Image: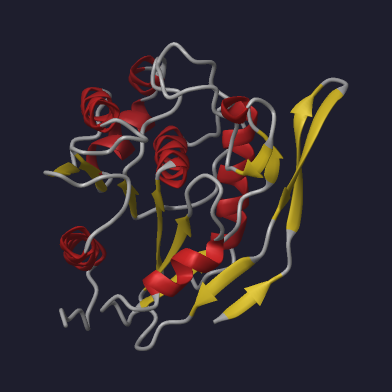
Amino acid sequence: MSYTNSSSMNFGSGNVRRTFEFGRTHVVRPKGQHQATIVWLHGLGDNGSSWSQILETLPLPNIKWICPTAPTRPLSTYGGFSSTAWFDAVEISEDAADDWEGLDASAAHIATLLSTEPRNVKLGIGGFSMGAATALHSATCYALGQYGNGNAYPIDLSAVVALSGWLPCSRTLKHRIEGSRDGIRRASSFPLFLCHGRGDDVVAYEYGEKSARTLSSAGFRNLSFRSYNGLGHYTVPEETDEVCSWLTANLGLGGFRLN
């Protein structure tokens, strides 16, 4: 496991600028042939280290995992108290204001991490909870070819995995993609894998299911949604096994083996 230095990014317009200081990034090197690189995003209040330890145990020897740590920032959901978070979330609801600036900053940070990977390696993003929401935002940026602020999205993504998450900025997604011929084309074939526990008491199952429906209606036809009876806001071997199988199939990986 290796580490990279923290980085900062400035986003904003006019006289208002916000600086996002990202934490330490943990890297799990492939044990076999390097065929894919996936940036994996932790949930609210977590860090890259905890997920790097989980990912290192998966039977996917040909994937390099990059596990960054989100900036520490004041959160509306915590009454202004600070926590590691990819963006500010007032609440998980279509009626809540979306933090486009924070989402774009995190998506840009992820794109920067992927930008130096070899050209022959497939690129993906995955995440849990708020990390899953950020991964889905990156998927919509890829389909549209631009971030929410209109700047060009530079990465050729091959797949996105979202566990126990939700789709931010969902209210305008269908309209934005329908207004882009390239967006319709990219969305229609892009592989998405969403998983959610029916017993989730943090990000309610209905939000995960509704996010899948919204993405599908917006044109993401190559989408799989899996639900798990009794599963709360955590992951279990059945879920990670299905993630491994899905990634192997959709990224054309070799070397997959279940223990």
The residue most toward the right is 15
Q: Quadrant of the rendered structure where residue 123 is?
A: bottom left
Q: Is residue 13 above or below residue 232?
A: above
Q: Residue furthest top?
A: 95
Q: Kindly tell me whether residue 190 is visible in this rendering.
A: yes
- In the image, what residue occupies the spot 47% across and 70% down? 52
Q: Nearer the viewer, residue 106 or 150?
A: 106
> Residue 161 vs residue 242: left or right?
right
Seen as rendered, the residue at the extreme bottom is: 32
The quarter of the picture where the N terminus appears is bottom right
Foreground residue among 82 and 23: 82
Q: Quadrant of residue 250?
A: bottom left
Q: Position of residue 11 (x, y in %)?
A: 74, 34
Viewer-proximal residue, 79 or 248?
A: 79
The reply, left or right, for residue 23 in relation to residue 188 is: right
Residue pictured at 24% horizontal, 25% vertical = 210
Q: Is residue 150 visible?
A: no
Residue in the image at 64% along x and 29% along y: 101
Residue 103 appears at what percent x and percent y?
Answer: 57, 35
Residue 173, x across and y down, in percent = 38, 21
Q: Is residue 95 toward the left or the right of residue 21 in the image? A: left
Image quarter where the C terminus lies is bottom left
Please tell me whether residue 17 is drawn above or below residue 31 in the rendered image: above
Q: How many marks?
A: 0
Query: Residue 195, position in %: x, y?
Result: 23, 46
At x 64%, y 31%, the residue is 75
